[in-house]
Image (cartoon, helix red, strand yellow):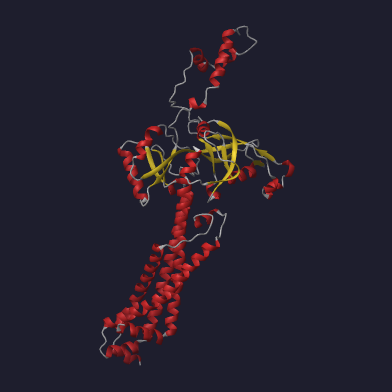
Amino acid sequence: MPIELKIAWRNLYRHKGKSFVIGLILCLGSFIMTIGNGVINGLDTGLQKNIVNNFSGDLVLVSDKQIEKTVLASMTGHTLKPITNFTELKPQILNIPSIDKILPAGAGYVWVLNENGNPLDQYLLGVDIESYLEFFNNNLIVEKGSLLKKNQRGVLVSTRMRDWYFDFTDSWTVPINTSFDQEKAPEKVKKNGSSLQTKKSIVYMGLSSKNASLDILTDVIGIVKFKELNSILGFYCIVDMSSFRECMGYFESSDEAVHLSTKNQNLMTSSLDSIDTLFNDSFDTVNESTTKIKNDLSDIKHIKTSQLDKKLGTYNIIFVKLKKDVNLNKTITQINNLLKEKNIPLQAISWNDAIGMFGQIAMLMKGSLFLFVLFIFIVAIIIIMNTLSMATMERIPEIGMMRAIGTKKRFIQTMFLAETSLLSFVFGGAGIILGSITIIGFKLLKLSTSHEMLQILYGGDTFSPTLDFISVGLCVLQLSLIVCLSSIYPIYLARKITPLDSVLRN
C-alpha cells in the first residue's frame, strides 16, 4: 500500500469524529442522488413503454399544412388537416430507413350530443381495430362488452369517458347485447336506483373547419380502458374508420365517381321552393314523372357511404414506430428533410409534442427532478468543502510539522485526495447501495395511483423507479465529481501551510 494511503487511513482514524460527519454527508448525498436518478430513469422508461409503445408511437406524421403540433391533445379543439392520398404515400413512407412500421388513423375533436342540450367535448380515434391492436401491443382491456370486429361499425367507450358521460347526463353507458349490472356499478351510479337511464348508443357530431361534418349515431360495442395511464389517455374513444370519416365529413375526392341522371342533377341544384312544389300533393301537377323523381331522390339518399367515402387513402394522422437505437430528435430532423426533398406533403412531430400538455408536464417533472438532484449535488459539495476546510485548519500543526521535515506540497495534496477518496468509497458507496435497495423496495411495493400528475411522475399507474448500469455509473460519476470539487479549496489551504504557521499556531 502506498505511503499516502497509509497516512490517509491513519489521519481518518485519528480524526474519526470529523471523518464520520463527512462520511454521513457523502452517504446521504449519494443516497438521495441515487433515488433521484432512479425516479428520472423510471419516468423515462415508463413513458416510453406506456405512451410511445401503447398510444402515440415514437412520432406522428401529419399534413405539411398542419400548423399546430399538439395533434393528439389539442386544448383548442383545432381539426387536423386530412391526408387524402395515403395509398400513394405508404410505400414512400416505408422506404424511409429509420421507420419500422406505421399505422394510419383519424383523430378528431367531437361533441357528444344529449337530451340535456349541453354537448360534451371529447376526442375520437378512428382506426382499423385489428391493425391498431397489433401496432400498439393489444393495449386495451375490455371492461364490458367486446372489442370491435373487422368491418364492424361502432364505438369503444373508455371507462373515463363513460364516467364523464354519467357526471353530465346522469345516464350510464352500456354496450349493446349486454345488460346493466347494478351490483358492479360504482356507488355514485347505484344512488340513482330505478331512475337510472342507460344508453347503448351515442350521437357524435364532428367539428370541421369547413363545416362539412355530420352527426352520427353509433352503437356502443364495448367499454374499455388502456392498460396504463387510462386516466390520462382515456379522453379518447375508439371508433371504426368508416364512422370516423362520416362524422368528420370526409366525403370529397372519391375514387369512384357517383353518376347522377340529368333529372337528379336538376333536383340537387333546384331551389327550395321548386322542390316543395314537386312533392306538394295539393298541386295537380303531380304525375308519373314526379313520382319517379321521388324514387330517384330516395336512391340518392341510399347511396352507400363507402362509395361517397371511397377515400381509401383519407386519414389525418399516421402513427410511426422507429427502428431501435435511433436518436429521436435527430431522426425527426432527418425525416422532415427527406419528406421535403421527395415532395411528400407530410411532416414529422415527436410524441411528446403531439400529446401536448401531458408531454410538456412530463418534461417539466423530469427537469424538476434533475434540478433537485443538482441542488443536492451542490449542497453536498458546499457542506463537505466547509467541513474539510475546518478540519484542515485544525491540522495546521500536523501539516506544518510534516512540511518542516521535508514533506512536499504534492505529497500533502495526494494525502488529502486519498482521505476524501477513502471516505467517498466507503460512505458514498454505502449510500448508492442503500439507494439501490430502496428503489428495489419501492418496485416490490407496487405503489399505484389514479392521480393524473402522479401518473406522469411515475411514468405509469405504478411507481417503478429503475436503475440500470448507466444510472449506477451516473451516480458514481456524480459522487466522484463531488469529491473532486469539494477537495479543491481544502487542498489549496493545506498547500499554503508552512512550518512557521505551525509554530505560530502552537
x and y percentages locating residue 351 in the rendered image: 43, 47
x and y percentages locating residue 230 in the rendered image: 55, 49
Quadrant assignment for the C terminus = bottom left
Residue occupying image coordinates x 46% and y 61%: 466
x and y percentages locating residue 292 in the rendered image: 56, 11
Q: Is residue 368 visible in this depiction of the protein?
A: no
Residue occupying image coordinates x 37% and y 80%: 389
Left or right of residue 4: residue 292: right
x and y percentages locating residue 164 in the rendered image: 61, 44
Q: Quadrant of residue 156?
A: top right
Between residues 394 and 23, which one lies in front from this camera angle?
A: 23
Rendered position, 228 above or below 309: below
- In the rendered picture of this protein, how many numbered marks are placed on residues? 0
Quadrant assignment for the N terminus = bottom left
Rendered position, 255 above or below 483: above
Left or right of residue 351: residue 402: left
Residue occupying image coordinates x 47% and y 40%: 131
Left or right of residue 389: residue 454: right
Q: Is residue 426 visible in this depiction of the protein?
A: yes
Left or right of residue 164: residue 305: left
Rendered position, 127 above or below 464: above
Q: Quadrant of residue 121?
A: top right
